[in-house]
Amino acid sequence: MSDDLQPLSPEEGVEMYLDLREGDVSETTLMNHGYRLNPFLDFCEEHDIDNLNDVTGRTLYKYYSYKKGAIKPVTLDNYLTTLRVALDLWADIDAVEEGLREKVPLPNLKPQDDVRDRVLRGDRAKEILNGLDTFNYASRDHVIMLILWHTGMRTGSIYSLDVDDYDPEEPCLKLRHRPEEGTPLKNEENGERDVSLSHPVAAVIDDYLAKNHYEVTDEYGREPLISSSQGRLSKGAYRTSIYAVTRPCEWGACPHAEVDPDDCRPADRRDKASRCPSTVSPHDIRRGAITESLNDGVPVEIVSERMNVSVDVLDKHYDKRTHRERMEVRRRVLREVR
């Protein structure tokens, strides 16, 4: 460690990095940068690194090895690319050695690596929802998982919903683009739509609103559908919720035989659930919901409109059916027309 470096904790370093980027990038991008740096903070905590001055090329190699194999190459590339940018800032403020960013290993991505194939399958989604229905009925976790699975909407879409956007009579959810009030939709006005709900799903939402919903308003005077005691639930909290409920040990046996449950931090701590290799993200649920709809024989054009994704993008990134599943759908359609 150089004598010219000034002490800075990893947590303070990440906070300073995010403060510096605020205003230069969108709120969503800034949130993504924070999310990509969280695993590095976990690594530092596990390895007793409480001063960025102590980070060396060997440290970065260990971090690369720590994450390699646990996540997809494209995700690892995103994490490390963001870390390289952060290291630039930390070098500028004398927290790490100049040029340390060049020592960050990057994975060799193949052309197909940008097509993400992690997906929540229908049988596992049903197991999770059955568990929530039995043990956490009409809880916030239950409603989040239920809406994401049955509508396939993005996290930004469920985040935008107010109580007034829920129509219990139809029943449906109304998605509207409101950037001036902090809830833009990804495709702006083109993302606006009404999404139908089944009556059983609506019944759970009704019970959540009656029993477990915080009746609060956000800074714009709107009453969010999914709320915390502080107001509109943060997007990060949605991810935490999904990581927590999709841990296999929540509803059954752990599939990782080498893991001692007493020493498993993802099992023991909700805020570490994302580190379980079998947990899934909200976007994996979206892929699963789209795939399940296609398996059910819903025409691709209907899925495209309901999930707000073009047919081309749906085919490349979201349709995760096997060849056998596609054959079974064709078989059912052919039976109906003959």
Image: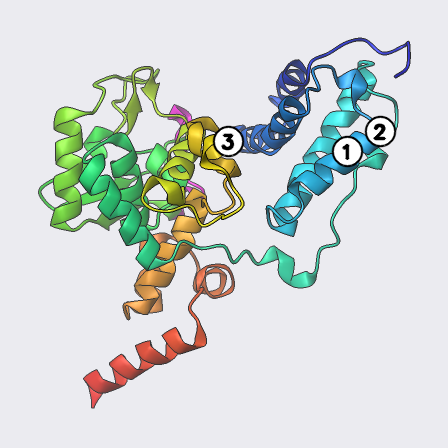
**How far apart in space, not on screen, are marks 1 and 3 (Cα)?**
25 Å
Q: Residue at x 88, y 23 (%)?
A: 98
Q: Is residue 4 left or right of residue 145?
A: right
Q: Residue furthest right?
A: 3
Q: Residue at x 8, y 42 (%)?
A: 169
The amino acid type found where label 1 is placed reads Leu
**Which one is nearer the viewer's eye here, 330 or 126?**
126
Q: Which residues are magenta?
A: 180-190
Is residue 118 in view?
yes
Q: How many marks?
A: 3
The residue where tag 2 is placed is: 100
Q: Residue at x 32, y 52 (%)?
A: 125
The amino acid type found where label 3 is placed reads Asp
Decide which of tag 3 and tag 2 comes sooner along the chain.
2
**Which one is nearer the viewer's eye here, 218 or 56?**
56
The amino acid type found where label 2 is placed reads Leu
- Determine whether label 1 and label 2 are within 8 Å by CB: yes
Decide which of tag 1 and tag 2 comes sooner along the chain.
1
**Which mark is nearer the camera, 1 or 3?**
3
Q: Is residue 129 above or below residue 30?
A: below
**Which mark is nearer the camera, 1 or 2?**
1
- Determine whether label 1 and label 3 are within 8 Å by CB: no
Is the residue marked by circle 1 packed among few (<14), some (14-19), or many (20+) residues within 10 Å?
Answer: some
Magenta stretch: includes residue 157: no
Q: Report x, y in % for residue 76.
A: 65, 44
The residue where tag 3 is placed is: 263
Decide which of tag 1 and tag 3 comes sooner along the chain.
1
The residue where tag 1 is placed is: 60
Q: Quadrant of the C terminus?
A: bottom left
- Determine whether label 3 and label 2 are within 8 Å by CB: no
Q: Where is residue 29, by image quadrant?
A: top right
The secondary element bearing badge 2 is classed as helix
